[in-house]
């Protein structure tokens, strides 16, 4: 009986030892043999020389070595060939494990396009600086009449107007339209005989302001009105930006003669006869003959009309640097 009890006790401890050995063996196999073999633990490889390859060759080389990669191709270097390797990390000869990510800077095919900055309304100096920083060049500088001197009015590319954020090739040449600013001592345009809309357009085109509009009689249709007097007088020197007053009527020159004399006493500095009525009558005659010519009636030649007493100045045109 004692023998069997001793044997049973021995078997108990033997089973404990065997279980411990089994656990240790499983641990050793799992963490020392299987995982090392599965992860290629302590197996490393050297980074090859990618500097003489293009991007396609470099990618194939890294994939054959089971290495991953990340490519940056933002910055263009004109001294290098398109798709050349500019830099990479880790460098040549660096030892890494399988699956390591390699960071590559590759030369793109050409310069990346750029956006046109918002320069409308900005000064010439600031606008030109922003264009240069954006990688664009200034072509023609075009001046147009505008109250904002040297302010950017429009931007043109290949003859077409473009807006901010338009995508352009880097180093593209854009033309900039700038305000010419106000001028002083500009000869006043002759507005006598013009309709209201035409007179307004002419005033604005010459950088003046539309001032008082005095209508001599009540009318239901403004298109029948004609300018029979203006201040400043046609041909006078006047500063741009100031108002121009107009007197309008649909009456005949004979009916307006006394009214014009009264206005001359107020606004003219000399006592000579005003040319306003003569010009007003001439414009009415020209209008009548133009209307008749639309009914297949031969038009009256300009030389047959009464001569102009007040010369007209043409609006200033566009000036290009």
Image (tube, rainbow, N blue to C red):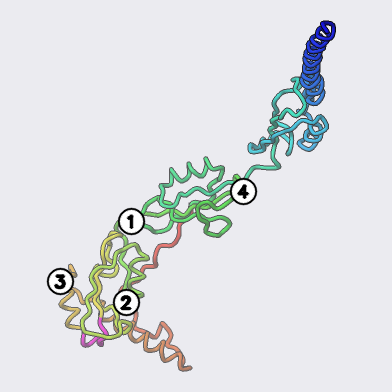
Q: From the viewer's perspective, is the residue at label 4 or at label 1 nearer? A: 4
Residue in the picture at 22% in, 87% down: 254
50 vs 295, nearest the viewer: 50
Q: From the viewer's perspective, is the residue at label 2 or at label 1 nearer? A: 2
Residue under label 2? 196
Q: Which is more N-terminal, label 2 or label 3?
A: 2
Spatial separation of the CA atoms under disc 3 and disc 2: 23 Å
Quadrant for residue 319, please give it.
bottom left
Q: Residue 265: where, in percent of width, then height?
A: 15, 73
Spatial separation of the CA atoms under disc 2 and disc 4: 47 Å
Task: Kindly check if marks 4 and 1 are in contact, taking CB atoms under 8 A apart as contact.
Answer: no
* Residue 304 is a magenta residue: no
Residue under label 1? 183
In the rendered structure, find residue 266 and report the number of the disc placed on it. Answer: 3
Q: Secondary structure at mark 4?
A: loop
Q: Which is more N-terminal, label 1 or label 2?
A: 1
Residue under label 4? 169
Q: Secondary structure at mark 1?
A: loop
Q: Which is more N-terminal, label 4 or label 3?
A: 4
Spatial separation of the CA atoms under disc 2 and disc 1: 25 Å
Spatial separation of the CA atoms under disc 3 and disc 1: 26 Å
186 vs 307, nearest the viewer: 186
For residue 257, side relative to residue 301 (left or right): left
**What segment is highlighted magenta in the picture?**
249-256
């Amino acid at each position: 009986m004692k023998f069997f009890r001793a044997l049973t006790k021995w078997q108990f401890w033997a089973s404990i030892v065997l279980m411990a050995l089994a656990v240790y063996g499983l641990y050793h196999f799992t963490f020392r043999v299987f995982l090392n073999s599965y992860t290629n633990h302590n197996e490393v490889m050297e980074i090859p020389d990618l500097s003489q390859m293009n991007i396609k060759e470099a990618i194939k080389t890294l994939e054959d070595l089971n290495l991953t990669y990340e490519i940056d191709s933002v910055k263009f270097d004109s001294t290098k060939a398109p798709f050349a390797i500019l830099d990479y990390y880790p460098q040549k000869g660096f030892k890494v494990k399988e699956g390591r990510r390699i960071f590559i800077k590759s030369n793109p095919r050409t310069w990346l396009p750029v956006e046109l900055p918002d320069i409308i309304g900005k000064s010439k100096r600031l606008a030109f600086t922003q264009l240069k920083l954006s990688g664009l060049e200034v072509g023609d500088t075009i001046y147009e009449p505008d109250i904002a001197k040297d302010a950017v009015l429009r931007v043109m590319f290949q003859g077409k107007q473009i807006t901010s954020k338009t995508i352009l090739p880097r180093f593209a040449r854009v033309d900039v339209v700038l305000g010419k600013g106000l001028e002083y001592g500009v000869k006043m345009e002759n507005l006598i005989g013009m309709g209201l809309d035409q007179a307004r357009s002419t005033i604005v085109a010459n950088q003046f302001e539309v001032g008082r509009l005095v209508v001599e009689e009540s009318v239901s249709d403004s298109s029948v009105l004609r300018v029979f007097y203006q201040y400043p007088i046609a041909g006078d020197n006047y500063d741009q930006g100031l108002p121009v007053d107009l007197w309008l009527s649909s009456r005949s020159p004979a009916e307006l003669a006394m009214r014009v004399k009264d206005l001359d006493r107020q606004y003219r500095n000399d006592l000579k006869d005003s040319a306003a009525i003569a010009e007003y009558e001439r414009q009415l005659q020209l209008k009548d003959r133009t209307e008749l010519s639309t009914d297949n009636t031969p038009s009256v030649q300009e030389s047959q009309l009464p001569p102009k007493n007040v010369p007209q100045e043409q609006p200033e045109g566009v000036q290009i640097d």
